[in-house]
């Protein structure tokens, strides 16, 4: 019974983290049809930025809540700036090209940015545990839950709700949905697709960086975290369906709980259970759980 | 695309490379061996690239080939290099044949992602397998060649010549394949798959074949690389390994078979140079080269040659 | 025409339903060899369903199709292509990055490939037979001056001719043309059809073509089938069908007689 509860809570926390990271990726793919490998860099920069922020507010002796806010704002700021530079500076040049070519461009950029991290922050690891420690923990029966984790889950839920609500009920959200569905027709209706692209990329970048920032207190912020996270994000997005926010949510939950189950029950399969699930889902539903195949337009 | 001239040119270069080896320092020979081994994987990617598919999971077959060599040596004590290379290729080919039924139904990004997932499954399995050393991997027994058991410089040279030989045979066979109907259908399928179906051809069958060819080549490359490095580990199946191969494919372009080998050599040279001169920034160097290639030379190095001919070989 | 010869295509009681939607029903047609049959009818009347069942892309729910006295009902499309039935498309399906010559060569090479699982690998793509066939097809459809032009740069009419030419390189005995003149300007329609029909007559190919332009149908069809609501409502010579009052009411509208003639 305890194991089941542990699996559920661990799975939920892991799912929250995966969702925050994956939602930006799926948004960018849905709108721009770009599989953005650089998303891993947004995550890494967010994490490193958060580590820096933690360093700042710990030394300046701020209250934790303010520190946490600084962390988030800094990360999202970094994400926005990076996103802007990348989108306006580089992606703009390759928009017309083959989807796969654009993926390779983002992959090349990712490689470059991996070393930019080293240039800025050096090769050492950073610890940013302060927010986690400050938040403390609560006990529910025999389970000890970190308050930080609870906040994480709450934030993921908030982002999911916000995304869902804004896509359905705000003007901008509906524009986005139109572009996701059919870019050409949207442009024909006078929608400024270029602007939509830029804004979407910025949102995606900010979310990616936010994911990194939120995870920073839980991990060791070191080289290579972007590399690991990007494949995980891909797996979640592939399972849920590219471009689907609900898909990212469900995908994150599936991966999160499966992984938690593996860790507690069959540790040997922990690493590949995610990709196994991805392969299985793709076999049954090639475009993911929430996306239908679109008939070929002649 | 493979005229008589380019065939003889390739042969001449091959002989030059073989003859020059004893005169070169060991580290150059060793580097070249790995480059030429990796070139086989790249050749497989070229076969897929021509039909418009990019696999982000060729590391799967590379790793299979490598571990076939390593495990056969470890469990049975068999070390004949020629047999092991062939075995690596065959088993990787069988894996590809099985996976191919699934992969042949996909295109574009989804093909790339599924191939990625499958390679990461192997990675996950290997990392968690304690008996195989998990992330550390393990070293492999020194290869022998039909009874001949060289050491030191002689071993390096023999492996090098074996790799060149495998490369030459692979290049010839792939060249022949490109001249067959199946090989030549790459561009038409990329252009208009439905039309090809309506002409009576099973497109998924053709793509399945290409997946298998790429798999065999990946396995051959992995086997040779493993023997050259002397060590195998799960990272050989990691997605960044696949990424490296794709990188070289972009560099080489898909027009000429020879480009895969030259591109691979250039890549290894650039990588070694970068790691040596600026160890903290070698990824940035590689990334920049890749980016510049995509932006300014989208058809790869091979297109530099095509510019002297009638029309570019293949468009991106 | 030899009256004892078996019809090249025999369709009997053909029916196709998708769930509760009846796309085609009670179709019985017998086509003698080398006849040119026009197929008319509004969109959704069942013409394309009919064609797709013959080419094997749809399996009939009921009924049978016989080609050259062989039952082909429900056979996969690849097999039917090999047996001698080809089709062309309303929107010309060609290979845009290849030249006209390369397009034809590929089609000819495919038609000449060896059979069996490894047939495509065992056949070289360049052969004298394929090249000769490609050149012949280009000449037959009179697109020689576009021989080395990349297909995506071709004018619409030439694209259609290329599309049909590619279908012909496989030496089919029955060719189904889906709206061959759609997208072609009025001035060029007749020229296009003249080229197509003379080419097909040279090869003694039986033709079924779907058309919306009644003038074209009147000019080029020996026989016309009129589809309405999933079934054939008229079947006769071009004049008989086009002058049929039901056809005029439901499909074509009244044919205006040229000035100076009396009803």
Image (tube, rainbow, N blue to C red):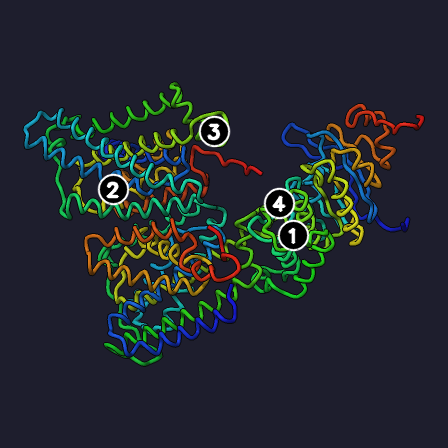
SS of the residue under disc 3 = helix
Q: Position of residue B195 (x, y in %)?
A: 60, 47
Q: Residue at x 71, y 49 (%)?
A: C85
Residue placed under numbered mark 1 in the picture: C146
Residue C112 badge: none
Circles 2 and 1, Cβ within 8 Å, touching? The answer is no
Query: Residue at 70% across / 36% down in the picture?
Result: C185
- Please check whether the numbered discs 4 and 2 fall on a single chain: no
- Is C168 or A258 nearer to us in this picture? C168
Residues behind callouts 2 and 3 on a single chain: yes
User: Left or right of B216: which side holds B265?
Assistant: left
User: Which residue, given by chain and number where applicable, does mark 4 sit on?
Assistant: C93
- In the rendered image of this protein, does residue A122 appear above or below residue C137? above
Provide the secondary structure element on which disc 2 rests. Answer: helix
Q: Chain of mark 2?
A: A
Q: CA distance from mark 2 to mark 3?
A: 48 Å
Q: Nearer the viewer, mark 2 or mark 3?
A: 3
In-image side of C65 versus B165 (left or right): right
Q: Residues within 10 Å of mark 4 (few under 14, many from 20)?
A: many
Q: Quadrant of the C terminus of chain C?
A: top right
Q: Is residue A287 above or below residue C247?
A: below
Labels 2 and 1 positioned on one and the same chain: no
Are the residues at dot 2 and dot 3 in contact (C-beta closer than 8 Å)?
A: no
The total of numbered circles placed on residues is 4
Q: Secondary structure at mark 4?
A: loop
Give me the C-alpha separation between circle 2 and circle 1: 65 Å
Picture quadrant where residue A69 is located = top left
Mark in front: 4 vs 1: 1
Farthest residue, direction right: C262
Q: Chain of mark 3?
A: A
- Is there one chain holding both mark 1 and mark 3? no
Q: What residue is shown with label 2?
A: A263
């Amino acid at each position: 019974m305890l194991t089941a509860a542990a699996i559920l809570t661990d799975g939920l926390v892991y799912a929250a983290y995966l969702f925050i990271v994956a939602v930006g990726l799926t948004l960018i793919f849905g709108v721009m049809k770009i599989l953005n490998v650089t998303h891993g860099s947004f995550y890494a920069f967010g994490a490193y930025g958060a580590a820096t922020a933690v360093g700042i507010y710990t030394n300046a002796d701020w209250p934790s809540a303010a520190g946490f806010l600084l962390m988030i704002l800094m990360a999202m700021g970094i994400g926005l700036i990076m996103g802007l530079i990348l989108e306006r500076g580089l992606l703009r040049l390759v928009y017309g090209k083959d989807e796969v070519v654009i993926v390779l461009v983002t992959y090349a950029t990712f490689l470059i940015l991996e070393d930019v991290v080293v240039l800025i922050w050096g090769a050492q690891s950073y610890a940013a545990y302060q927010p986690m420690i400050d938040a403390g923990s609560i006990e529910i029966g025999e389970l000890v839950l970190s308050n930080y984790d609870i906040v994480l889950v709450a934030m993921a839920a908030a982002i999911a709700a916000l995304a869902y609500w804004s896509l359905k009920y705000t003007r901008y959200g509906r524009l986005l949905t139109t572009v996701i569905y059919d870019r050409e027709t949207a442009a024909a209706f006078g929608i400024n697709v270029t602007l939509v692209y830029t804004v979407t990329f910025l949102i995606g970048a900010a979310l990616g960086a936010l994911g990194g920032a939120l995870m920073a207190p839980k991990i060791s912020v070191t080289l290579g975290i972007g590399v690991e996270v990007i494949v995980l994000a891909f797996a979640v997005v592939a399972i849920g369906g590219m471009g689907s926010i609900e898909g990212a949510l469900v995908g994150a939950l599936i991966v999160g709980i499966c992984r938690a189950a593996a860790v507690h029950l069959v540790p040997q399969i922990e690493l590949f259970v995610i990709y196994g699930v991805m392969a299985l889902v793709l076999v049954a539903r090639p475009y993911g759980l929430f996306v239908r195949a679109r008939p070929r337009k002649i | 695309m493979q005229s008589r001239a380019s065939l003889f040119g390739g042969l001449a270069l091959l002989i030059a490379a073989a003859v020059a080896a004893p005169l070169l320092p060991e580290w150059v020979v060793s580097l070249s061996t790995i480059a030429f081994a990796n070139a086989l994987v790249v050749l497989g990617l070229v076969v897929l690239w021509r039909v418009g598919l990019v696999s982000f999971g060729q590391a799967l077959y590379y790793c299979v080939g490598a571990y076939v060599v390593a495990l056969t040596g470890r469990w049975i004590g068999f070390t004949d290099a020629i047999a092991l290379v062939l075995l690596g290729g065959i088993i990787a080919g069988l894996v590809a044949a099985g996976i191919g039924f699934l992969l042949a139904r996909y295109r574009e990004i989804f093909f790339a992602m599924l191939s990625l997932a499958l390679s990461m499954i192997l990675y996950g399995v290997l990392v968690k397998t304690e008996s195989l050393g998990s992330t550390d991997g393990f070293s492999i027994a020194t290869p022998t060649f039909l009874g001949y058991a060289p050491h030191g410089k002689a071993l390096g040279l023999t492996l090098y010549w074996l790799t060149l030989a495998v490369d030459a045979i692979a290049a010839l066979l792939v060249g022949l394949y490109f001249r067959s109907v199946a090989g030549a259908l790459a561009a038409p399928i990329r252009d208009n798959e439905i039309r090809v179906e309506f002409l009576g051809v099973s497109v998924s069958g053709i793509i399945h074949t290409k997946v298998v060819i790429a798999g065999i080549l990946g396995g051959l490359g992995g086997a040779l690389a493993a023997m050259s490095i002397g060590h195998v580990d799960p990272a050989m199946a990691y997605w960044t390994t696949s990424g490296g191969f794709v990188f070289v494919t972009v560099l080489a372009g898909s027009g000429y078979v020879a480009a895969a080998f030259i591109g691979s050599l250039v890549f290894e040279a650039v990588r070694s140079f970068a790691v040596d001169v600026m160890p903290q920034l070698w990824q940035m160097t590689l990334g920049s080269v890749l980016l510049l290639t995509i932006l300014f030379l989208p058809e790869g190095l091979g297109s530099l040659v095509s510019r002297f001919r009638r029309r570019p070989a293949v468009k991106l | 025409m030899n009256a004892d010869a078996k019809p090249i295509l025999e369709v009997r009681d053909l029916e196709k339903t998708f769930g509760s939607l009846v796309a085609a029903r009670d179709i019985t047609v017998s086509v003698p060899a080398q006849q040119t049959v026009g197929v008319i009818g509004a969109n959704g009347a069942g013409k394309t369903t009919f064609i797709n069942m013959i080419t094997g892309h749809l399996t009939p729910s009921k009924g049978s199709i016989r080609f050259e006295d062989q039952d082909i009902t429900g056979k996969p499309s690849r097999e039917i292509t090999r047996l001698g039935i080809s089709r062309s498309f309303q929107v010309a399906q060609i290979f845009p990055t290849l030249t006209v010559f390369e397009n034809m060569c590929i089609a000819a090479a495919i038609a000449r490939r060896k059979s069996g699982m490894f047939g495509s690998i065992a056949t070289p793509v360049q052969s004298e037979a394929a090249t000769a066939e490609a050149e012949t097809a280009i000449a037959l459809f009179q697109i020689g001056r576009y021989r080395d032009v990349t297909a995506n740069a071709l004018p619409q009419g030439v694209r259609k001719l290329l599309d049909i030419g590619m279908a012909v390189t496989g030496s089919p005995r029955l060719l189904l043309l889906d709206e061959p003149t759609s997208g072609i300007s009025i001035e060029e329609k007749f020229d296009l059809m003249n080229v197509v029909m003379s080419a097909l007559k040279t090869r003694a190919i039986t033709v079924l073509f779907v058309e919306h332009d009644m003038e074209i149908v009147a000019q080029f069809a020996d026989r016309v089938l009129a589809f309405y609501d999933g079934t054939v409502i008229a079947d006769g010579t071009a004049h008989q069908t086009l002058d049929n009052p039901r056809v005029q009411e439901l499909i074509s509208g009244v044919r205006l007689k040229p000035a100076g003639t009396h009803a």
